[in-house]
Amino acid sequence: MSHESQRTIATDNLILDQPLPLTIHPAAVYLSSLSEGSRATMKQSLDAIASLLTNGSGDAYTLNWAGLRYQHTAAVRAALLERYSPATAQKMMCALRRVLREARKLGLMDAEGYAQAVELPSIKSSKNLRGRALTGDEIAALMGVCERDGTAQGVRDAALIAILRGAGLRRAEAVNLDLRDFSRETGRLEVRRGKGEKDRLVYLPEGAIGFVERWLTIRGRKPGALLCPIRKGGMVQLRRMTPQAVLLIVQKRATEAGVKSFSPHDFRRTFCSDLLDAGVDIVTVQKLAGHASPVTTAKYDRRGEDVKRRAVQRLEF
């Protein structure tokens, strides 16, 4: 972004004179309404916006969000489109609008000021899914490098990949699993407070259950997080991993296996796409994935025209 753009945004002193209690701080109230997995991501978005508005001197908690007006939000929108992809800019502007809505509801911003600040053109982004689905050979290569590792990390990483690929969990959902959420007998995983604060039950394929069981022989059966960090000496720490740690593990194993770069979320894409390819109905896939709407699930359907042609042959005349 140009220096001129920065000067255009940071024209006023928008730093709070004194801290607001978190109970009436619009950014804090908004962030507290999110799931644990989304909170960190949206906090980063708000920090970035606050930095733009204060020439780097403010963050989500020190910015006076209630002081924003149309000239500020319009400049932020333009700057985000210069710096980020349309999809990312859209997500960040959504966070900004939500914080301003909280400011209005908390009585920190009048209705007219709020209406003017959020009256901006929507950002259009491609509806195509980013990322990719992994092939069976790629998944086998990833599991292979974990099994050949010979360390506790290798066993844990195999269990992690088995859960991401076999149950289609988001990485924040995977690290939020507790030992009690896993059933050895059925392969059931109880996802607590997934996206939208919703709980759901999912099931691991039989082939994936063994990888989790092998990890539990190292982890032990004490209550706590199912997937845990491991010290260099091999000592398991009974606490939660972070979503960022999952990303780093996946990147490491992809490099070792010679697999083209992908994200943890691509396991989820593969999960949905493979189930749809196998003929599982879209409503069942929606429930397993925890999508709010089957419209979202339908985006993962990579079946072509031949599937539709065969489907109508079932009709009798």
Image (cartoon, grey):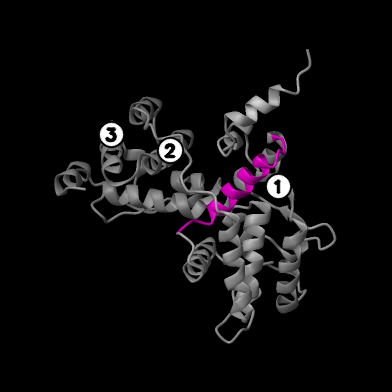
Q: Is residue 119 left or right of residue 214?
A: left
C-alpha span from label 1 to label 3: 38 Å
- For the record, the magenta segment spans 261-281
Q: Residue at x 21, y 46 (%)?
A: 10
Residue 151 image position (x, y, % from top left) = 61, 81
User: Looking at the image, how many numbered discs can be counted on the residues?
Assistant: 3
Query: In the structure shown, which secondary structural element does the residue marked by tag 2 occupy?
Result: helix
The residue singled out by tag 3 in the image is 74
- Residue 276 within the magenta-colored segment of the rendering: yes
Relative to 229, is 272 above or below?
above
C-alpha span from label 1 to label 2: 24 Å
Inspect this view and state whether residue 306 appears. yes
Callout 2: 10 Å neighbours few (<14), some, many (20+)?
some
Relative to 25, is 163 above or below?
below
The residue singled out by tag 1 in the image is 199
Q: Give the mark nearest the N terminus, 1 or 2.
A: 2
The residue singled out by tag 2 in the image is 94
Callout 3: 10 Å neighbours few (<14), some, many (20+)?
some
Query: In the structure shown, which secondary structural element does the residue marked by tag 1 occupy?
Result: loop
Q: Quadrant of the C terminus?
A: top right
Q: Give the mark nearest the N terminus, 1 or 3.
A: 3
Inspect this view and state whether residue 60 appears. no
Q: Residue at x 59, y 31 (%)?
A: 295
